[in-house]
Amino acid sequence: MAGGNAIRGSRVGAGPMGERERGEAAPRTRVGFWCANKHATNVAFASDVEVPETWDCPRCGLPAGQDEANPPPAPRNEPYKTHLAYVRERRTDADGDALLEEALTRLRARRGA
C-alpha cells in the first residue's frame, strides 16, 4: 500500500474543483457538418466568430458542409505526372525535335573539335 499522500489524484497546478470557482464558460454555438460519406460532425464555435462553410471530416478527411442533403463533393485527385508529361504540356513535338537537333549539333561540334 502506498504511503499517505494528501494530494493523490490531482495534478500539480490544478485549480479548485467545481465550475463556480473556475468562472463561466464562453458562449458556444454547435454546428453540424456532413461529408459525402454521410459522416456527421458537430463542432463547437464561439458565438462571436464566423462559422466556416466547410470543415474537414475527422473520420475520412473529405470536406464536410452544413447541408446534410447536399454535402460538398470529394475533390478530384489528379494523377501523378512525370517530368516528361509536364514538358509535353509546354512543348509541341516540333519544338522537341528542334531542341534535340540543336543539342546534337552542339555535341557533334564539341566532339569534332
Image: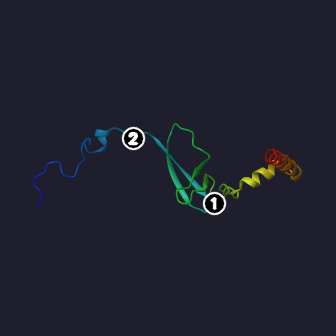
Marks 1 and 2, how far apart at CA: 33 Å
Viewer-nearest of discs 1 and 2: 1
Where is residue 58 shown, x and y percent of the image? 52, 56
Q: Report the amino acid beneath label 2.
A: Ala
Q: Is mark 2 on a helix, strand or loop?
A: loop
Indicate the quadrant containing the C terminus: top left, top right, bottom left or bottom right. Answer: top right
- Kindly identify the residue that appears in the image at 63 percent across and 60 percent down: 36
Q: Of the residues under marks 1 and 2, which one precedes in the sequence? A: 2
**71 above or below 106?**
below
Residue in the foreground of this view, choosing between 26 and 12: 12
- Kindly identify the residue that appears in the image at 10 percent across and 55 percent down: 3
**Circle 1/circle 2 CB separation < 8 Å:** no
| Left or right for 41, reference 22 | right
Q: Name the residue under label 1.
A: 36
- Kindly identify the residue that appears in the image at 57 percent across and 39 percent down: 50
Q: Using a 10 Å C-alpha cutoff, classify the residue at mark 1 as few (fewer than 14 neighbours), some (14 to 19) or many (20 or more).
A: some
- The residue at the far right in this view is 94
- The residue at the far bottom in this view is 37
Q: For the image shown, how many numbered marks are present on the structure?
A: 2
| Left or right for 101, reference 73 | right
Mark identifier at residue 85: none
Indicate the quadrant containing the N terminus: top left, top right, bottom left or bottom right. Answer: bottom left
| Image color mode | rainbow
Where is residue 96 shown, x and y percent of the image? 84, 50
| Left or right for 23, reference 95 | left
Mark identifier at residue 25: 2
Q: Report the amino acid beneath label 1.
A: Ala
Where is residue 12 shown, x and y percent of the image? 24, 44
**Residue 17 occupies quadrant:** top left
Q: Is mark 1 on a helix, strand or loop?
A: loop
Q: Using a 10 Å C-alpha cutoff, classify the residue at mark 2 as few (fewer than 14 neighbours), some (14 to 19) or many (20 or more).
A: few
